[in-house]
Amino acid sequence: MAKVYYDKDINTGSLQGKTVAIVGYGSQGHAHAQNLRDSGYSVIVGLREGKSFDKAKEDGFDVRTVGEAVKDADVTMVLLPDEGQPKVYEAEIKDNLKENSALAFAHGFNVHFNQIVPPENVDVFLVAPKGPGHLVRRTYQEEAGVPALFGVFQDVSGNASDVAKAYAQGIGAARAGVLETSFQEETETDLFGEQAVLCGGLTSLVKAGFETLTDAGYQPEVAYFECLHELKLIVDLMYEGGMENMRYSISDTAQWGDFVSGPRVINEETKARMGEVLTEIQNGQFAKGWILENQAGRPQYNAINNSEYKHPITAVGQELRDLMPFVQNPIR
Ligand code: NDP
Ligand code: MG
Ligand code: MG
């Protein structure tokens, strides 16, 4: 079994007394900054003026321009959107990095695909939480944590790995488990997971189920509850105790249906498609397409985003969630 690090296994000495600059204050940024501060580290936040800047100030941080934050940092964690990182790195980070400091990321994309080429005189590592930023913060406050991967790309100081582990510990990840990886493995598995299973696979599965029921004349409200709402309840059981716990809780009829129909829906054909998705991630085709899409101003991204929003599941979902006050909807 892979070595999994927990709080008791991590010596935080290599990060104690150091200044961490968190660049960006979005989903991951606010969580890293607040968790590290609560863990006793000295944190400064680097941002442009705007919404996040005001929010970070309101939350009591020393907020500076990106360059001014990086200048004083022993560890610079880059938590900008991946597609925007190269530009900000070139203009504001690169020339402000202190010699022998550390440059860190929460996803390996830009370093792995050579969109950012770090200088030779700094440590380079990643600490990638395996969960959304808002849960990185929420679970920390609940004395729990989101697991994370750490990986070292460049070790100048000789203790990049210890600093990375201490950082992961500081954001609360070592309560859940911290695992070593490489930039390549983290980048490729993260992209695959979000495309094939967690985000892409899941939304396509939900829509296909919803459409099959509504096309057959069933009520959209019933289809929504069946194919989307209930998913969380099922996933919670899997999260808590694996597939065996979910199967323990459902009826034997449901479990029999799971056995005989599941593999007809997700089958060898689906796995072959997943293999293609993985190949395009590994050979850089996905990265190239996404980089070019951004350079072109995201025409396809915006078109698909608009048409997805018009899917009938959106309207029925909004109506039903409004009637369930206990369901939190942070984007509305
Ligand atoms: P977000 O889009 O949520 O946040 C981006 C932040 O960067 C905002 O505070 C934004 O501020 C700021 N920003 C954007 N452009 C600039 C700029 N030019 N100069 C200064 N600040 C800027 O990003 P995420 O948290 O989603 O992603 C950050 C990293 O974490 C990525 O590498 C991602 O892959 C990784 N990651 C993300 C996960 C997630 O849960 N979202 C999970 C695991 C890893 P403003 O308000 O001014 O726009
Ligand atoms: Mg991920
Ligand atoms: Mg990702």
Image (tube, rainbow, N blue to C red):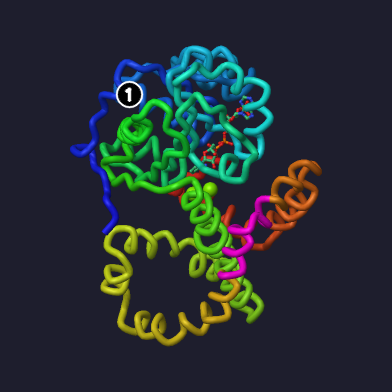
- Mark 1, Cα crowd under 10 Å, few <14 / some 14-19 / many 20+, is many
Q: Is residue 284 magenta?
A: yes
Between 226 and 72, which is closer to the camera in this rendering? 72
Up-down: is 83 above or below 62?
Answer: below
Closer to us: 231 or 302:
302
Depth order, front residue of 226/326: 226
Residue 208 appears in which quarter of the rendering?
bottom right
Q: Is residue 320 visible?
A: no
Q: Position of residue 247 (x, y in %)?
A: 31, 74
Element type at marker 1? loop
Q: Residue at x 74, y 57 (%)?
A: 307
Q: Residue 225 in the image: state x and y as whole percent.
A: 49, 65
Chief secondary structure of the magenta portion: helix
Q: Does the stretch in magenta take in 50?
A: no
Q: Residue 32: where, in percent of width, then height?
A: 42, 30
Q: Residue at x 28, y 40 (%)?
A: 174
Is the CB of mark 1 within 8 Å of ligand 1?
no
Q: Is residue 194 visible?
A: yes
Quadrant in which the C terminus appears: top right
Q: Describe residue 211's horizontal placement relative to residue 183 as left or right.
A: right
Q: Residue at x 65, y 54 (%)?
A: 284
Residue 146 in picture, x, y percent from top left: 35, 44
Seen at 59% across and 22% down, the residue is: 93
Judging depth in this view, the residue of 200 and 322 nearest the camera is: 200
Q: Quadrant of the N terminus?
A: bottom left
Q: Which kind of residue does numbered mark 1 sit on?
A: Leu
Residue 281 quadrant: bottom right
Left or right, residue 294 beside residue 317: right
Instruction: Classify residue 13 as left or right of residue 297.
Output: left
Q: Quadrant of residue 16?
A: top left
Residue linked to disc 1: 15
In the rendered structure, which segment of residues is drawn in magenta?
Answer: 275-287
